[in-house]
Amino acid sequence: MDKFQVWETVLGRLSEKISRMEFFTWFKKVQIAEISGTAIVLACPTEMNKNWLESKYRTIILSNFQAVLPEIDTLYFTVDLSLADKPQTSKVFETKSEKPRKLPNQPEQQFSDGTKTRITQERFTLSNYIVGEETKFAHAAACAVAESPLTEKRKYNPLFIYGGVGLGKTHLLQGIANEIRRLNPNAKVIYTTAERFMNEIVKSIRERKSNELRRKYRQVDAFLLDDIQFFEGKEKTQEELFNTFNDLYEFNKQIVFSADRPPSELKGISDRLRSRLGGGLLADVQMPNIETRMAILQEKSLAKQIILPNDVLEFIASNVRSNLRELENILNQVSAEMEITGTSPTVQSVGRIFRKLNPGEDYTLSNDSTKFIAKNSDDIITLVSEYFQVPATDLMGTSRKSEIVLPRQIAWVLCKEALKMSYEGIGFVFGGKNHTTIMHGIRKIKALGRKDSTVARHLHSLKKDLGLK
């Protein structure tokens, strides 16, 4: 066998032993660089990819090579940056592309306002939820609840999932609802949001249909309520939920809640309801680590049928640290730009997207090769214009507005330090300003950078992009 056939065979074996997402994330761009005697060298597209395979997968990779070539006893890893841009040729990744499991047809449910809805989105399943260390327990709890036969006594009731905004709580709740329906096609399952639940209560009172609403929610097999913190201070809604909870719990029906914080911190919720919420299993979700964020990006980009270079994946994952909705928002922007321009994204182009969404923030570039190369003052003006979202013509104009003056003077500093331009040269570029004006402006910004944290952050971020210290 040649090295391509060897790697194809080993990939096939590895794909059966490693989760699909790990497999796609860490092995898709890896190739055999060399087979020499009893040693094999694997080439990886990035330093991060190399380090991750070395530390996490060396043993399993080597054992699978030995199953194909028994004489192999040594495994080396190297970096080949060109692999990031090469198309994937292995058929293993094509055969391993997973199609979403079909759910049984969900009957449309009638709400008190007369509207009909499927309640949940089929794209949210427990099988496509990317599990990391920070979400492992919450996902395991969700699976246990969803897979537990409806006729047995509930082990985890209620299940209360909590965590910050945009960290996947809704995915878990809807995934539970969809899985229960898949396993029990005739089950009555309701997933709803706290806001919708409250609006239904208000409407039922106004139309004198409270009994109808109670029958709807108290005759289900599973009740899932999202964002319960919305009920803080709303006494009538809390009373209705308390009574609904008691009925469902008494008849062994599954109850699942979510909130942005644990029950003990929901101060606007009555003591008796808070006691019910915290009486079952509590599971928190936190922001996934960078490796899991990369896996999530890989999954979502595959769903969009786009391929992102590994350095771009790493850059996005490194700079989205707050929630997963931001991660998806960035990916949507990148996808739209790819479609419009017909070009593949780079770290620089994605950096510009970050700055459009959050002007003035500091974003980390993956390595020195991705630094912005400023060849002349036009490049500096472009960089500062995109960073502050200020038109380049304003930077070179005469406006005295503070939101223009600060970026303009920062551009002067960068021209001086990155391009070694004279005060006179900078003045000429920026509308014919004299030597003294430029000199005082640069001194002013440097002084501000020593005492104003915002100015210091702007300088640090822009200088980092230019490779300056």
Image (cartoon, rainbow, N blue to C red):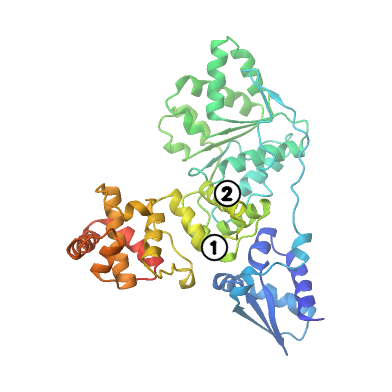
Q: CA distance from mark 1 to mark 2?
A: 15 Å
Q: Quadrant of the C terminus?
A: bottom left
Instruction: Say which quarter of the image contains residue 153.
Output: top right
Q: Is residue 225 visible?
A: yes
**SS type, badge 2:** helix
Instruction: Say which quarter of the image contains residue 233.
Output: top left
Note whether 341 is above or below 239 in the view shown.
below
Relative to 392, 55 lies left or right: right
Q: Amino acid at mark 2?
A: Asn
Numbered circles on residues, count: 2
Relative to 423, 76 lies left or right: right
Q: Earlier in the sequence, mark 1 or mark 2?
A: 2
Residue pictured at 39% horizontal, 71% vertical: 467
Give coordinates of residue 89: x percent, y percent.
74, 68
Note whether 337 is above or below 38 in the view shown.
above
Q: Amino acid at mark 1?
A: Thr
- Out of 82 and 294, give the one closest to the viewer: 82
Q: Which mark is residue 332?
A: 2
Mark 2: give few (<14), some (14-19) or many (20+) Cα within 10 Å. some
Give coordinates of residue 184: x percent, y percent.
76, 35
Residue pictured at 74% horizontal, 65% vertical: 15
Q: Quadrant of the N terminus?
A: bottom right
Q: Is residue 360 visible?
A: no
Give coordinates of residue 35: x percent, y percent.
72, 85
User: Which residue is disc 1 drawn over?
Assistant: 346
- Out of 316 and 76, give the one closest to the viewer: 316
Give coordinates of residue 92: x percent, y percent.
77, 65
Residue pictured at 66% horizontal, 58% vertical: 21
Residue pictured at 74% horizontal, 34% vertical: 151
Q: Which residue is most to the top? A: 208
